[in-house]
Structures are given as structure tokens and as C-alpha cells.
Amino acid sequence: MDIGNARVSTAKQDLDRQIDALRKEDVADKYIYVDKKSGSTTNRPGLQQARAGDVIVVHTLDRLGRTVRDTLNGQQKTRPKAKVPV
């Protein structure tokens, strides 16, 4: 199943652009999860919704993690696939 993840680092930042991009990729609103956390934290409730076999759709790769290593480590936990619209 495709699930969307939108992330901002602070509560003051706006998620609208990311959520709009996820909707354009046909991710249903009920499967769009939002995290208002720093990219450096591993406590990301939205990403924890992913299960093996799910496809995580994000607006840009930097929404998954602060570094490539963070992103790859996150994928090792649940083994989801990632999809980034171009």
C-alpha cells in the first residue's frame, strides 16, 4: 500500500506543499502521516506506520532523513520502499 509522509522540523513550518504533492500522487488522505520532528530524530510516528511491503511516498528525499545514512537506517527497520515523485 502507498502511504504518504510529510515532515517539518518545527510546528511553525507549513506542510501544505508536501501534502498537496502526496495527494497528486494519489495517496489517500487517511494514509498521509505527518511528523513535526527534526530529521535527526528516530522517533517518527508517521514513518512508524509503514509495514513491510508498503511504499512510502514523500515530496523530497530529505523528508525521510537528514542524511543518506539516516534514510537507509530507517528503511532497514521496516523494509518499505520509497517513492519520490519527479
Image (cartoon, rainbow, N blue to C red):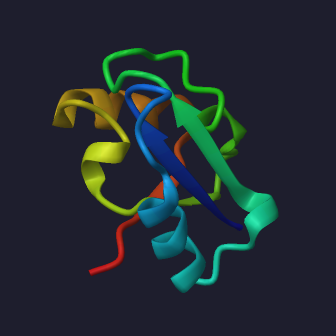
Which residue shows up at 34% across the image and 26% down it?
39
Extreme-right residue of the structure: 30
Above or below, 31 relative to 46: below
Rendered position, 72 above or below 86: above
Residue 45, image quadrant: top right
Q: In this view, does 32 lie to the left or right of 42?
A: right
Outermost residue on the front side: it is 12
Image point (52%, 43%), residue name: 79
Near-viewer residue (49 or 16): 16
User: Where is residue 9 shown, x and y percent of the image?
Assistant: 38, 28
Quarter of the picture containing the N terminus is bottom right
Q: What percent of the width, then of the height, locates residue 77? A: 52, 28
Q: Is residue 83 above or below residue 49?
A: below
Which is more toward the observer, 43 or 35?
Answer: 35
In the picture, the quarter occupied by the C terminus is bottom left
Figure quadrant of residue 64:
top left
Residue at image point 64% right, 57% down: 53
Q: Nearest the camera: 47 or 54? A: 47
Judging depth in this view, the residue of 9 and 41 nearest the camera is 9
Residue 38 placement, left or right of 70:
right
Count of numbered badges drawn on the protein: 0
Q: In the rendering, at what x and y percent does residue 48 appear?
A: 65, 32
Q: In which quarter of the image is residue 2?
A: bottom right
**Relative to 20, does residue 50 appear above or below in the rendering?**
above
